[in-house]
Structures are given as C-alpha cells and as structure tokens.
Amino acid sequence: MWFRRDLRVNDLPALTAAVAAGKTVPCFVFDERLLTGYRFVSPARVSFMLGCLSELRGSLRNLGADLFIRIGLPEVVLPELAKETGATSVHWTEDASPWANRRDQRVSAALVADGFVAHPHPGSYIVADPGEIVSGKGTPYTVYSPFFKAWKEVPRRPLEDPPSQVRCPNGLDPGTMPTMEELGFDQGTDTGLTSFEPGETAAREATHAYLNEGLTAYADTRNSPTGGSSRLSPYIRWGCLSPLELETKLGLRDGRGPAVFRKELAWREFYASVLLNFPEVMSTEFQERYRGTLDWHEDAKLLDAWKLGRTGYPLVDAGMRELLEDGWMHNRVRMVVASFLTKDLHIDWREGERWFMERLIDGDVASNNGGWQWVTSVGTDPAPYFQRMFNPMTQQERFDPEGEYVRRWIPELRSVPDGHLVRPWLMSEDEQAATGCRIGVDYPEPVVDHAEERRIAVERYRAAVGGTDSPDDEASAQQS
Ligand SMILES: Cc1cc2nc3c(=O)[nH]c(=O)nc-3n(C[C@H](O)[C@H](O)[C@H](O)COP(=O)(O)OP(=O)(O)OC[C@H]3O[C@@H](n4cnc5c(N)ncnc54)[C@H](O)[C@@H]3O)c2cc1C
C-alpha cells in the first residue's frame, strides 16, 4: 500500500484492497523531486505532511503494522520493496495532478516490467473519477453549474470500514521519519507555523465539531472571514478526511447549510475535472483569448508589498498575513487578495498562484489554479472580467464590519476606531497620534489607488479581448 496524499485509515479503498490481498506493507516514499526540486516547493506543507505521517504511523502500529518509510524515486523504490517483501501487487489512490499522473505511469511501467500488478484506486474525490463526468456531447464540462448537476447524479461507491488489523511481513526495516533538514530544507526554514493540528484524528474531531456546531448556519456565515466556514481544507487536501465520508454525513442532515456545503465540495471536484481534462491550464490561461494578450506588469516592490501584507488596504493585508503566519486564508479573502494582485497591481496571476502554493497547507494544484484563473477571469466558469473586480474596501465593509478579522491579523490597526478601519489613511494627524498608528510609519499608505487601477484594469482587459466585453457601469460599480 503506497500512501501519497491519502493519509488516513478510514474509507480508503486502496488500503482495503491491499489488506484483503494478504500481508501488507504500508509505505510512504519521500520523493526528492517533490520536496525541493518541484515548481511549488512548500516547507509549510511538508511540515504539515510530516505531522500527518507521524499520526498515520501511530494508527498503523495500533493495527499491528507500521508505516514503512523510504526515500528516493518511487519508480525505483517500490519495485525494490515489492521484491524484498515478496509482494504481488501495489495499491494506491489516484490523483488529479499531471505531475502525479506522469509519475504514476512511470511507477506502473516499472512494476509491470518486474511482474507486479499496479493497482490505482479511487478515494481522493467523492466520485470515483471527476475527469470522466462529461456532457451529453461527450465533452468535459467547463462551466460549474451543469457540472454540478451531472456530478450529483453520479453513483457513489460504498464507504470502506477501516481495517480491524493490518498484517505485515516480519523483520522489515521500518525506516525513520526524516526531519525537515534531512529532507533538504535549510535548518530553521520558516515552516509557517499553523494553528491546524495535523493528522486523521484531528481531522475527524474537527469534522465532528463542525457538523454539529457550524454547518447549520453555513449558508449564511460561510463568507465571514472570522468563522463560518469549516476550515477542513488542509485535511481534505492531505486525505486525512475522506470527502465521500464527509458527503455521506451531510446527506443525513437537513437544511440549506448541508446543501450549500456540498456545492462547495463539488467545486473541488470541478477543478479536478478541469485539470484532468485540460492539463495545459498549469501553464497557460484556459481561455485562449487571454493567452499572451494581457499586459502584465512586473514590479518586485509591489509584489513584495502584497506578499508581506503591506499594501495599505487592511482586508488585503489581513489576508496576506493570515497566509504568511497560519498557512491558510479564508475563501472570501482569497478572492479579494487575488483580485488585488491581478486587477489593482496588474501582476501576473501565476505569481500569486506560486505564492499561494508556497504558503498554503491546503495548497492543491487543481483548486489553486482553478481559483486563480477564476478570479483573474481567464479560466473556466467564465464571467466578464469586470464582474470579478473586488473592491477591497466595500468587501471589508460587508464581510468584516466590526473589524474583527483585520484587527486580529494587523496589530498596528488594533486601536484604530471602527469608522477609520476601512480607510485608515483618512485619519487626521491627531487621530493617528491618538491611536498610535502613523500612516506611512506604523502602517503603510495605500500602494495604489483602487479606483484608478480599476479603470486601468478595464482598459487592459478590453484591449486583450478587442473590446468585445464591456462593463455596464451601473452593474459593475455594484460588483466592485
Ligand atoms: C485564488 C484561490 C486559490 C485557492 N487555492 C486553494 C487551494 O490551493 N486548495 C484548496 O483546497 N482550496 C483553494 N481555494 C478554494 C477555497 O478558498 C478553499 O477551499 C477554502 O477557503 C477552504 O476553507 P474551508 O475548508 O473553510 O472551506 P468551506 O467553505 O468549509 O468548504 C468546504 C470544502 O470545500 C472545498 N472548497 C470550498 N470552496 C472551494 C473552491 N472555491 N474551490 C475548490 N474547493 C473548494 C474545500 O475542500 C473546502 O475545505 C482557492 C480559492 C481561491 C479564490
């Protein structure tokens, strides 16, 4: 049983199949290419993963086995381990990323060449294969709503019980869990300490608590950055939680909360389907008309101000500091900061995609790429660009009216009164002195003027599409 991003023992078809086949060697292979040589290297995510792996090892030991740790290339390590243990088949859970798929093909080929059976299983998604959901014409969906309609009708597999026992061969070296330094990260690498506790036990506890306490109000509260959403994404990302088990538990509950929550889970499956069918989105815009036609600005200073949460716009800065300090960010704020990067600073969405992947412990190539392309108006589920221009000030007024979120993440603004929290730069000098927050000294002045940059963004996008979409000023003013 080759674990990858399915770090659990509950409802895991690959584990069930491996255990049913006889003695089992649960293993995890640290692949150097993914750790430090990959496009989206993330010490924060690796550190979280190490926590999940330690917990999984404990669970497997309680079941009578172990988690056998190896370091190297899976296409070399796995056939060797299979030979060493006399295995006949190797089981794993399928993934949506093009990189993972290429690796799995190499692993399969190496195993088959040595006479072993290579056996991928579902388990990462609610449906067995989101990429196979196609329209009546046989083409993949590129708009979310019809995808959702088709997705919810796809029959679900039965849930798998966790094994009551895992028998493994005697005398096999379990290997030691490596440290961050042993994995090639510099000593003292900032791993982005996070308030999320890693592992399946924490995932199940968080799920239980959310289903019983937060879910009923989800439809109304999910947009509040200080609460309301489940914060289960790191666990879903690492497979500490089976999304199918989660959906099954929702099905037992009535009301709008569970229904809306299920729709959000389906966004994850939609973006997996997009990536499986259009892997080119990893390097280019889904919409051809935006490929190479948008004039992106290069400005290292502005990019840094955005990354460090020093743009002078409190909601943007609070989100970016949450990301920096906690390795996570609320969805509403992800949309606001992504719009700010691409439509206020006019910086290429790929810069934002990369920074999110570096910092997010739930960083997932499919959902992250999908989210960035959606906000930038260049991806699937299209809408005219001017409908996805978020005004950071009105968004703060709507979604953080008491300033709880902004004050939590920006200590300099804690004593700024409510009336000035959205536009602190409008405080008089006396007010700045009284609150201990000097604009330009303690907290930055706005790095750009939103209204002006919005106008420029409209021009840039209009130029890219040759003037075909154009904002109806009334409607778009309301949006932004
Ligand atoms: C620019 C951008 C980048 C993003 N990058 C990622 C990423 O790397 N990894 C990631 O898991 N999500 C990503 N998202 C989606 C979303 O922001 C997070 O899934 C959500 O904030 C996680 O918080 P939660 O668990 O409290 O969500 P809830 O609101 O409680 O939703 C439950 C679950 O549904 C899924 N989900 C919800 N919304 C989305 C969505 N829009 N797209 C995909 N899945 C969704 C997640 O698995 C989430 O845990 C991104 C969104 C944007 C706008």
Image (spheres, helix red, strand yellow):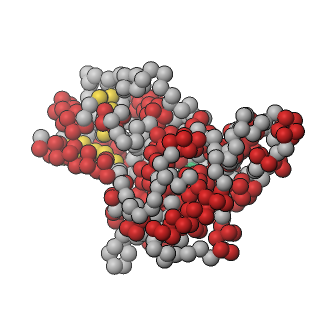
Q: Nearer the viewer, residue 359 or 347?
A: 347
Q: Nearer the viewer, residue 161 or 247?
A: 247
Q: Position of residue 461 (x, y in %)?
A: 50, 66
For residue 311, which quarter of the picture?
A: top right
Q: Nearer the viewer, residue 196 or 278?
A: 278
Q: Is residue 139 left or right of residue 364?
A: left
Name the residue: 58% across, 38% down. Answer: 308
For residue 27, which quarter of the picture?
A: top left
Name the residue: 28% across, 22% down. Answer: 173
Q: Is residue 139 above or below residue 236?
A: below
- In which quadrant is the N terminus drawn? top left
Whether residue 16 is visible, yes or no, is yes
Whether residue 335 is visible, yes or no, is no
- Count of numbered labels shown in the rendering: 0
Q: Position of residue 391 (x, y in %)?
A: 66, 59
Q: Is residue 255 left or right of residue 21?
A: right
- In which quadrant is the C terminus drawn? bottom right
Q: Is residue 275 above or below residue 133?
A: above
Q: Position of residue 238 (x, y in %)?
A: 45, 43
Q: Nearer the viewer, residue 464 or 255?
A: 464
Q: Position of residue 403 (x, y in %)?
A: 76, 47
Name the residue: 59% across, 51% down. Answer: 337
Q: Is residue 270 above or below residue 198?
A: below
Name the residue: 53% across, 60% down. Answer: 375
Q: Is residue 95 left or right of residue 241?
A: left
Q: Is residue 286 left or right of residue 338?
A: left
